[in-house]
């Protein structure tokens, strides 16, 4: 998915880039075209100028729209000071090489300085077109994200309303079951209490956009204790979190679908079971999350994970992209252990 989107963006930018250069070169030669008509020598000259202009602008285009695409406007302007120097160096080097090849004298330094202004115009016009195209493309993407977030919020609201239908009946029933369990079966009482706690958290979090990280991790710990009651020694888990981010707000129920995937696809099919490791710490002024399972070795591709029947991974990826503009990363090591990781900014 990401490759296709990036390829489409690059093709659109290249089309703007090449067509813009062709229009500029054609306009430059239009007086001679009207006066002398189309001749072979003139077409060769147009083709040479167009090729040199394209090759001279390519490094600047790559640096601005791929390598450092996310720069702020101030830093991008500063970068243009560097890239225009690269542009002029390539422009004059290519022209000098061409004139040497055809055996014609090259312009002296004085003429080069006189032509600095005219030669700057193609650079300025082309990159103005590319920046305008980028602005409208990003604005359209932002509108799509806002629309999708509104749809998700509406669906979340509906799900919240459904979840609130007679919730007390469920909790009262669980309390009744717990009260009927003999005192010698204390472990069963604890499991019932933990199950009630998970339901309460899910119901409470459905009404909130964000919760403190420690609450999310407490919920995951309870969830995994319940799963451990089912799998026994086949399931081990570790949750580690940096103290400085324990109280930071995170989206409610963000990690649970990924942990559930780890249990379902990593622990459940593994005869010997495995370990789930959840790590949360500060990195590059963002919160870094990773969930690793060492259970059943995964032998497919990362793309197949997103194309499967489950929606936990794909939905979390969409949530991160739309809410924070962050990508989810999936890695499979040599033993088949799967690690899902991502960053989210700290508000």
Image: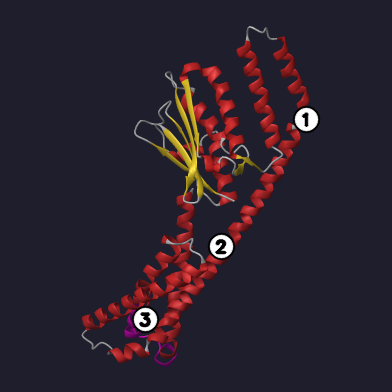
Query: For mark 2, what is the residue?
Result: 137
Frontmost of labels 1 and 3 is: 1
In front of the other: 297 or 225: 225
Q: Is residue 193 left or right of residue 38?
A: right
Which one is earlier in the sequence, the residue at label 2 or at label 3? 3
Residue 16 visible from this viewpoint? no
Identify the residue at horizontal 43%, vertical 73% (top origin): 80
* Marker disc for residue 276: none
Query: For mark 1, what is the residue?
Result: 165
In front of the other: 309 or 35: 309
Q: Bounds of the magenta span?
A: 33-49
Q: Residues within 10 Å of mark 3 (few under 14, many from 20)?
A: some
Query: For mark 3, what is the residue?
Result: 46
Marks 1,3: beta carbons within 8 A: no
The x and y percentages for residue 314 are 54, 40
* Magenta segment includes 136: no
* Magenta segment includes 43: yes
Q: Residues within 10 Å of mark 1 (few under 14, many from 20)?
A: few
The x and y percentages for residue 67 are 41, 60
Q: CA distance from mark 1 to mark 2?
A: 43 Å
Q: CA distance from mark 2 to mark 3?
A: 31 Å
Circle 3 sits in a helix, a strand or a loop, which is it? helix
Which one is earlier in the sequence, the residue at label 1 or at label 2? 2
In front of the other: 246 or 165: 246
Identify the residue at horizontal 55%, vertical 17% (top origin): 229
The x and y percentages for residue 156 are 69, 41
Identify the residue at horizontal 40%, vertical 28% (top origin): 297
Q: Is residue 250 left or right of residue 335?
A: right
């Amino acid at each position: 998915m990401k490759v296709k989107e990036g390829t489409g963006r690059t093709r659109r930018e290249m089309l703007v880039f090449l067509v813009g250069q062709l229009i500029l070169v054609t306009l430059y030669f239009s007086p001679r075209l009207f006066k002398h008509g189309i001749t072979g020598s003139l077409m060769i000259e147009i083709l040479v100028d167009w090729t040199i202009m394209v090759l001279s602008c390519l490094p600047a285009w790559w640096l601005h729209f791929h390598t450092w695409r996310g720069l702020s406007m101030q830093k991008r302007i500063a970068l243009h000071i560097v890239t225009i120097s690269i542009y002029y160096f390539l422009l004059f080097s290519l022209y000098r090489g061409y004139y040497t090849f055809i055996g014609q004298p090259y312009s002296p330094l004085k003429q080069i300085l006189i032509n600095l202004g005219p030669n700057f115009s193609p650079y300025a016009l082309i990159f103005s077109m590319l920046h305008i195209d980028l602005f409208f493309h990003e604005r359209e993407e932002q509108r799509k994200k806002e629309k999708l977030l509104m749809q998700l919020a509406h669906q979340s609201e509906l799900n919240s309303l459904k979840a609130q239908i007679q919730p007390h009946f469920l909790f009262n029933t669980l309390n009744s079951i717990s009260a009927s369990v003999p005192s010698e079966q204390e472990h069963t009482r604890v499991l019932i209490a933990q199950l009630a706690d998970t339901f309460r958290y899910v119901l409470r979090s459905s009404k909130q956009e964000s919760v403190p990280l420690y609450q999310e991790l407490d919920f995951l710990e309870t969830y995994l204790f319940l799963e451990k009651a089912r799998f026994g020694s086949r399931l081990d888990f570790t949750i580690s979190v940096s103290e400085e981010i324990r109280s930071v707000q995170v989206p409610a129920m963000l990690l649970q679908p990924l942990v559930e995937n780890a249990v379902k696809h990593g622990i459940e099919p593994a005869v010997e079971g495995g370990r789930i490791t959840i790590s949360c710490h500060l990195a590059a002024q963002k919160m870094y999350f990773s969930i690793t399972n060492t259970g059943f070795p995964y032998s497919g591709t990362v793309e197949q994970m997103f194309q499967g029947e489950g929606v936990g991974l794909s939905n979390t990826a969409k949530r991160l992209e739309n809410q924070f503009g962050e990508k989810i990363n999936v890695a499979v090591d040599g033993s088949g252990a799967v690690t899902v990781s991502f960053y989210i900014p700290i508000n």
